[in-house]
Amino acid sequence: MLQLIFIFPDGTEKLLSVHSGENIMDVAVSNEIDGISANCRGNCACSTCHVYVEPEWLKCVGMASGMEEDILDFAPNARSESRLCCQLAMSETLDGLRLRIPDWQRWN
Ligand code: FES
């Protein structure tokens, strides 16, 4: 099992054990992670799965695709470390990945 950590705006964290290959948005939804409503269910069309990748993980996570960048353009408070977690799958390389939930998103 691999470890995935979500960090909430108040600084609390949720540690999850996940399998390699699992979609991170699916993991968030099935674990009722507050702030990941994933309204389009992974179709890269809504940005309600927006997360900030912690700086030490940016290189491992890699760059967003063009389509993902287009959706992030409409996400409130998108930053250079923003990603849509529906476009990310867990892998051995991402074991211990830390993702921060945007503040505005938590109660949407
Ligand atoms: Fe809609 Fe990720 S779930 S863009």
Image (cartoon, rainbow, N blue to C red):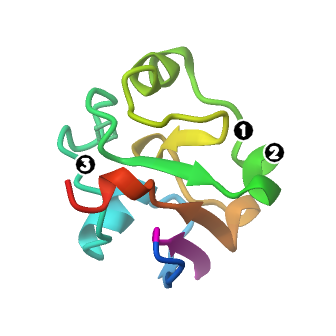
Residue 23 visible, this orientation: no
Considering only order in the chain, which callout, 1 or 3, is on the residue closer to the N terminus? Answer: 3
Residue underneath mark 2: 59
What residue appears at the point 20 percent right and 53 percent down from the top-left corner? 108
Q: Is mark 3 within 8 Å of ligand 1?
A: yes
The correct choice, above or below, for 47 with respect to 96 in the image is above
The kind of residue tagged 2 is Lys
Q: Amino acid at mark 1?
A: Gly
Q: Position of residue 77 (x, y in %)?
A: 47, 37
Q: Which residue corresponds to mark 1?
A: 62
Q: Of callouts 2 and 3, which one flags the residue occurring earlier in the amino acid sequence? A: 3
Q: Are marks 2 and 1 in contact (CB under 8 Å)?
A: yes
Which disc is residue 89 wearing? none
User: From which residue to which does the magenta span run?
Assistant: 1-9
- Please determine whether, in this image, residue 14 is positioned above or below residue 94: below
Q: Is residue 14 magenta?
A: no
